[in-house]
Amino acid sequence: MQDEATSLRSSLLTAVLFTVVGAVGLAYAYATRSHPLDLLPGLDGTLVCGGMTLLVGLGSGRSYRETVTMMVPIAAVQAASCALSRASMPAVLGLEALVVGLVGLALYLAATWGQGVAPARESAPAGRHVAA
């Protein structure tokens, strides 16, 4: 149980980090360019590939962190494609990070939904009864 709680906290930290970095990347891209997400079809394809990797990885039973690790090569291809096509790298990587982070937050909320809603009741010592 402790290992599962540690894994959930670690996944939450990863999701929050990706969400914040993605939002900052998109904000920077929109502040420095007039149309940062005006992309070539190949870059749109890398975004679709990243999204599909996320869906297939999670759908096949892998953990959130394993799925994010599987997406590292795709992010490298996205960065190289942005550099070669002179597209906005913060916009592309920020959008991908924002989606990954929001999915991670949703997974965390789904995993913890209903846990810790009511305070834990203390058990009474043997021989005593506690009125509810």
Image (tube, rainbow, N blue to C red):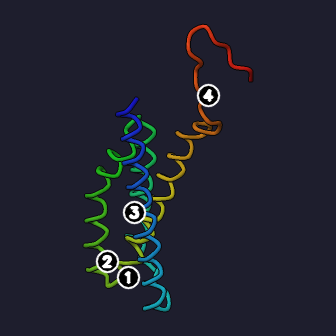
Whole-angstrom CA distance, mark 2 to mark 4, is 56 Å
Measured in 3D between alpha carbons, the distance from the residue under mark 2 to the one under mark 1, in whole angstroms, is 6 Å
Q: Which residue is mark 2?
A: 82
Circle 2: residue type? Cys
Residue at position x 43%, y 42% in the image: 58
**Which of label 1 and label 3 is nearer to you?**
3
Determine contact: label 2, label 1, CB under 8 Å. Answer: yes
Residue 126 sits above or below residue 78 on the image = above
* Left or right placement of residue 25 versus residue 131 in this view: left
Q: As drawn, is 68 to the left or to the right of 128?
A: left
Q: Earlier in the sequence, mark 3 or mark 2?
A: 3
Q: Position of residue 63 (x, y in %)?
A: 38, 40
Residue 17 marker: 3
At 39% from the left and 45% from the top, the residue drawn is 64
Q: Secondary structure at mark 1?
A: loop
- First of labels 4, 3 by sequence position: 3
Residue flagged by tag 1: what amino acid is it? Ser
Image point (74%, 23%), residue name? 132
Q: Is residue 83 left or right of residue 23?
A: left
> Which callout, 1 or 4, points at the residue further toward the start of the chain?
1
Residue named by callout 1:
88
Report helix, strand or loop for mark 4. Answer: loop
Q: Nearer the viewer, mark 4 or mark 3?
A: 4
Q: Is residue 24 above or below residue 33?
A: above
Going by the picture, which residue comes out furthest to the right? 132
Report the amino acid beneath label 4: Arg
